[in-house]
Amino acid sequence: MQPYVQLNSHCIGKSHLAKSKPCEDYSLSYGDSSLSAAVISDGHGDSNCFRSAEGARLACEICINLFRQFQGISSHITDIGSCDFESMVLSLEREIAVKWRKSVIADSVARPFTPQEMEQVLPELAEQYRNGQLAERAYGCTLVAAMVTRSYLLCIQIGDGKCVSAYPDGIFVEPVPKDENCVGNRSTSLCSREAEKLFRHYFSGILPAAVFVSSDGVEESFDASGLYRFFYSSAYWCREEGVHSSVNRLNDLLPKISEGGSGDDVSIASFVSLQAELTAPKQPLEQVYQRVSAVSSSLEQIYDLILSENDKLHDKQRLVEEAERELDSLKKLMEQKEKNYLAVCDECEAIKAGLFELNKKRESAARNFEKAEVYKASAEKYWFAEYRRLGMAGYEQEETEAAAVPAEEMPAKTVFADEDLPPEHDE
């Protein structure tokens, strides 16, 4: 047989400390020249199972003792395939369940349930307890155990928790079949009716490099890869530093695991080969599947986003094309507006030039008008005087009006320069 070393540790959880409850986990390990064994038991955190801590301790002790007996019975077997090993295992499980039930009932007789213990029990169950019925319910607990001999590995389990076997190439597996009845806070238990039929097991002639068993308090504090790395680390410490140092490490670490994880009681037990190579755990296949599924889901989401963004892009491109057409139209309109603007500007300049010339002519005409007015007044005075001298009638009024111009201002003959003549008299 390969030499194995064994270690185990258990401690109270953060939530139990807060509620002043005792530690209901228990662990044991055993080793000699022909057998290595590791076992943990997790008492139910239920007010109806007020002696589950005692039930867990009894389960571990009974299992170790029966493992030792089982190894003695099976020591002659060199190939488990050559015998009805399944029946032997079923018989072992039945014996564990029966002996545990007898032990807890005997304890309940030797130490009757106290009023303080019965305070939180459901009324209908409390009545049965007082009548000496279902006493094993008060001791309810799970059990996870493994043993290895020169010829075989055997793992058995009832209820939740973890059993993991590790092999030299870094393969970490959970060999015991899952229990579909363990959902949420519900779990199969040694106190269940016909508990012997609720065990699951695994056996093999291929010997592992290490086996680890732990309560659900440890399991729920890690994901699968984290749990395997924790198991691997404990095995590494055991091989490199020795059992005593490894147990001290676990005693220090388990309370931190509970506080940072599940908050529940935590327990672990294992046996580790000192000869077989043990490498860091490979990523579990389940996690690989989950990773592939996650990547596939992410890829589908990306495809959906690409399709959505392509639709948006097509919509925006249509808007861009419409905007470009509108912009071209506006550019043409702008060009036409600019031409019109320049034409109007030219017209404005022409009008300004025309106005300038007209103003010059207006100024010249105003000067000629003033001169014409003076000439008119002089001419009227002269002619009215002549009409009077000739005795022509009808000019008295005109003469009176003309008298406003002094006679001395009426020239004998007025001569206009060409530029002084009104435009209509230009010669």
Image (spheres, helix red, strand yellow):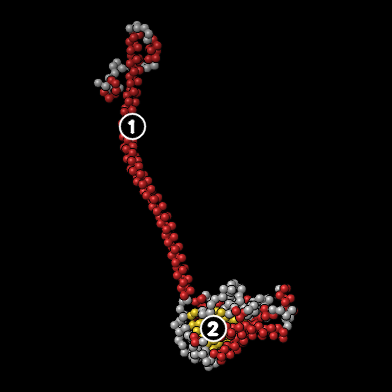
User: How many numbered circles does the render carry?
Assistant: 2
**Image side of residue 12 versus residue 336, left or right:** right
At x 26% / y 23%, what residue is drawn?
A: 418
At x 58% / y 85%, what residue is drawn?
A: 92
Indicate the quadrant where residue 37 lies: bottom right
Is there a contact, CB below 8 Å, between mark 2 and mark 1?
A: no
At label 2, counting other C-alpha atoms closer than 10 Å, the crowd grade (few under 14, some 14-19, many 20 or more) is some
In-front residue for pair 349/62: 62
Residue 392 placement (x, y as % from top left): 35, 7
Q: Which residue is mark 1?
A: 355
At label 1, counting other C-alpha atoms closer than 10 Å, the crowd grade (few under 14, some 14-19, many 20 or more) is few
**Image side of residue 422 versus residue 74, left or right:** left
In-front residue for pair 262/71: 71
At x 49% / y 82%, what residue is drawn?
A: 166
Q: Which residue is mark 2?
A: 86
Indicate the quadrant where residue 218 lies: bottom right
> Whole-Å distance between the Cαs marked 2 and 1?
126 Å
Query: Is residue 408 in view?
Result: no
Residue 337 placement (x, y as % from top left): 35, 41
Q: Secondary structure at mark 2?
A: helix
Residue 242 placement (x, y as % from top left): 52, 90
Residue 237 placement (x, y as % from top left): 51, 86
Q: Which residue is at the far left?
A: 427
Residue type indicated by callout 1: Leu
Q: Which residue is at the far bottom?
A: 33
In-front residue for pair 87/261: 87
At x 54% / y 90%, what residue is drawn?
A: 74
Q: Relative to residue 158, is residue 332 depicted above or below?
A: above
Task: Tell me the quarter of the image containing the C terminus.
Answer: top left
Q: Secondary structure at mark 1?
A: helix
Residue type indicated by callout 2: Glu
Query: Is residue 46 in view?
Result: yes
